[in-house]
């Protein structure tokens, strides 16, 4: 395996990353909500599109296809998000954004309204399910998938869902 560079607290855990890579086809389009250091390596494994609110992260890694979606409060702008995902043939997704600020967590629950997008995905990874809101998302989305696995990685937890 290539060297995993997502080593800081804001990155996907190594175990979650490996489990996700094992489930996807390298020809698939993967949509990542929230970029980070793991985006660099992930872009070598698939056709990666990343939704990112922070302009400092846009185009950080040349093999990542970035889309800027500003935040409206603590969630992605729903209009811009919907415009971007229209037409993308997404087969897998990583839900790891938007981030929180201070003691407020970013709201990722808007993804629950994206039923058509979710229905096209064969694999979904929800990071940070040790938090209540992310666990709620994982439990709700798991109803649409045949399989799920809870991945513990130190203090972090993620849910992997697949058909």
Image (cartoon, grey):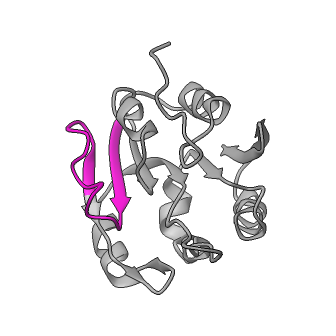
Q: Nearer the viewer, residue 92 or 13?
A: 13
Q: Quadrant of residue 101?
A: bottom right
Q: Residue at x 55, y 60 (%)?
A: 119
Q: Is residue 79 placed above or below 145 in the rendered structure? A: below
Q: Nearer the viewer, residue 49 or 96?
A: 96
Q: Quadrant of residue 163?
A: top right
Chain part drawn in magenta: 47-66
Q: Nearer the viewer, residue 87 or 58?
A: 58
Q: Residue at x 41, y 33 (%)?
A: 42
Q: Residue at x 58, y 33 (%)?
A: 17
Residue 86: where, in percent of width, then height?
A: 31, 68
Q: Which residue is outermost to the bottom?
A: 73
Looking at the rendered structure, the number of numbered marks drawn on it comes to 0
Residue 109: where, in percent of width, then height?
A: 61, 74
Q: Is residue 141 placed above or below 72 in the rendered structure? A: above
Main SS of the magenta part reads loop
Q: Is residue 55 placed above or below 63 in the rendered structure? A: below
Q: Is residue 160 placed above or below 22 in the rendered structure? A: below
Does the image show residue 81?
Answer: yes
Confirm whether the magenta stretch covers residue 49.
yes
Confirm whether the magenta stretch covers residue 22.
no
Residue 47: where, in percent of width, then height?
A: 32, 38
Image-based side of 8 in relation to 55, left or right: right
Q: Which residue is outermost to the front?
A: 102
Does the image show residue 77?
Answer: no
Image-based side of 50 in relation to 144, left or right: left
Q: Nearer the viewer, residue 80 or 26?
A: 80
Q: Which residue is outermost to the top?
A: 1
Q: Residue at x 32, y 71 (%)?
A: 69
Image-based side of 162 in relation to 154, left or right: left
């Amino acid at each position: 395996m290539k060297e995993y560079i997502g080593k800081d607290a804001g990155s996907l855990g190594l175990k979650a990353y490996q489990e996700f890579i094992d489930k996807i086809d390298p020809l698939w389009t993967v949509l990542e909500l929230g970029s980070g250091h793991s985006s660099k390596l992930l872009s070598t494994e698939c056709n990666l599109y990343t939704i990112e609110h922070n302009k400092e992260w846009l185009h950080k890694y040349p093999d990542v296809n970035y889309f800027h979606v500003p935040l409206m409060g603590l969630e992605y702008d729903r209009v811009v998000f919907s415009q971007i995902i229209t037409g993308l043939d997404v087969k897998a997704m990583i839900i790891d954004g938007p981030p929180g600020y201070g003691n407020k967590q970013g709201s990722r629950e808007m993804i629950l309204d994206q039923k058509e997008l979710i229905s096209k995905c064969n694999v979904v990874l929800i990071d940070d399910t040790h938090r209540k809101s992310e666990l709620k998302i994982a439990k709700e989305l798991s109803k649409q998938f045949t399989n799920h696995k809870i991945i513990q990685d130190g203090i972090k937890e993620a849910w992997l869902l697949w058909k």
